[in-house]
Amino acid sequence: MGLSRSDRGGRYGDGMSDMSDPHASASCQPTTSEPHAPAGSKLVFIDIDGTLADDHHHVPQSAIDACRQAQQHGHLLFICTGRSLMKIEQSILDLGFDGVVSVAGARADINGRTLFEHLISPEAIDAATEYFLAHDIRNYQWQGPDGMYVSRGYMQYLQAKGSAWKDPQFASRWHVIEDLDTRGRSLGASIRASKGSYFADRGNPTSFEDTCKALSPWFTAVPGTYGKISDNHGELLIPGVDKGTAVAQVARTLGYSINDTIALGDGGNDMAMILAAGTSVAMGNGIEDIKRAADIITDSVEDDGFAHAFSRLGLI
């Protein structure tokens, strides 16, 4: 589904490997002059799962065409995902987006450079890990610039699914927590991460509300994407850092008014950017809270809702 780089107009095609360097600078120096957005240009933030791509990680051709046409009309398109940069399929990056906001707003990359990156404190990682062990929550992961660190239970879940664990693009990036040689240090002191996620097995008596309350000194918890297999599932975000704060910071950096920003999403971790953007779009397959908060509700991802939204917004 890749497009030639000259057709795409975006910057994250075949040069993407340079951007994913885990040792990239955590911030960039400000420019000497204030940037100004081109007249009529919109800055569009796009969630991946359930928005750009369906449950099988397939991006409809109509969405690919819509992205290309919008860029040709002078609009800038940013992926804005809960995934870490290392967990995004190369086939999606090769579509040629102008930038990537990853790990639910904790990192942004623009034009091959890291604009900002926030990391979870070691103490917070250790507190959550201890909580998971104490409450028999066996499926959890931490995502960061060096890879994905997963519990053995989560590894078994991925192996059962097949594609994510066996995909050669990601194979070297998974690290099983129980197998790590931490040299006597705690897990939090041994890894770098910007977001956590978890799901409890069916029948586990610990509720999402219980987990939110217990981890509130260290994290902001939002509902996760495991509703079909778990009654308690969520993403653990750095307090004060989310997709909404990333939308605002990227817009300021590029000289866009917040009124000229657009956000498209479907899930719980999209709420912050839906509320922050000048115009917001909920996918037809989105959760009810997102639909209530958004300015526009489009069709589902499977029914070309992404392209329909771009058309309705005048981007194409």
Image (cartoon, rainbow, N blue to C red):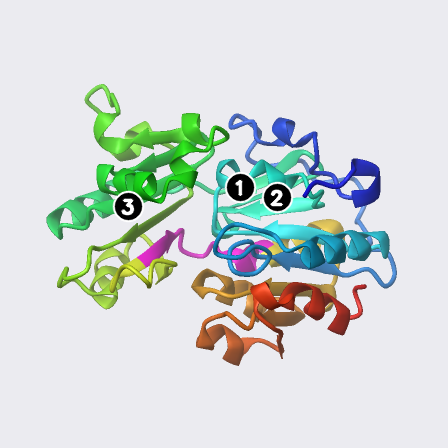
Per the model, the C-alpha gap separating discs 3 and 1 is 18 Å
What residue is at 51 percent from the left and 63 percent from the top? 270
Circle 2 SS class: helix
Residues drawn in magenta: 234-246
The type of residue carrying mark 1 is Ile
One can see residue 313 in this view: no
Most foreground residue, 52 or 20: 52
- Rendering coords of residue 191 (x, y %): 34, 31
* Nearer-N-terminus badge (2/3): 2
Circle 3 SS class: strand
Verify whether residue 244 appears in magenta. yes
Residue neighbourhood size for the residue with mark 2, other residues' Cα within 10 Å, grouped as few (<14), some (14–19), many (≥20) = many
- Rendering coords of residue 16 (x, y %): 65, 32
Q: State yes or no: discs 2 and 3 in contact (Cβ < 8 Å).
A: no
Residue identifier under label 3 = 140
Q: Which mark is residue 88?
A: 1
State how many labels appear: 3
One can see residue 190 in this view: yes
* Nearer-N-terminus badge (3/1): 1
What residue is at 61 percent from the left and 39 percent from the top? 91
Per the model, the C-alpha gap separating discs 2 and 1 is 7 Å
Most foreground residue, 82 or 57: 57
Decide: is 175 above or below 11: above
Q: Quadrant of the C terminus?
A: bottom right
Q: Quadrant of the N terminus?
A: top right
Residue identifier under label 2 = 92
The type of residue carrying mark 3 is Tyr
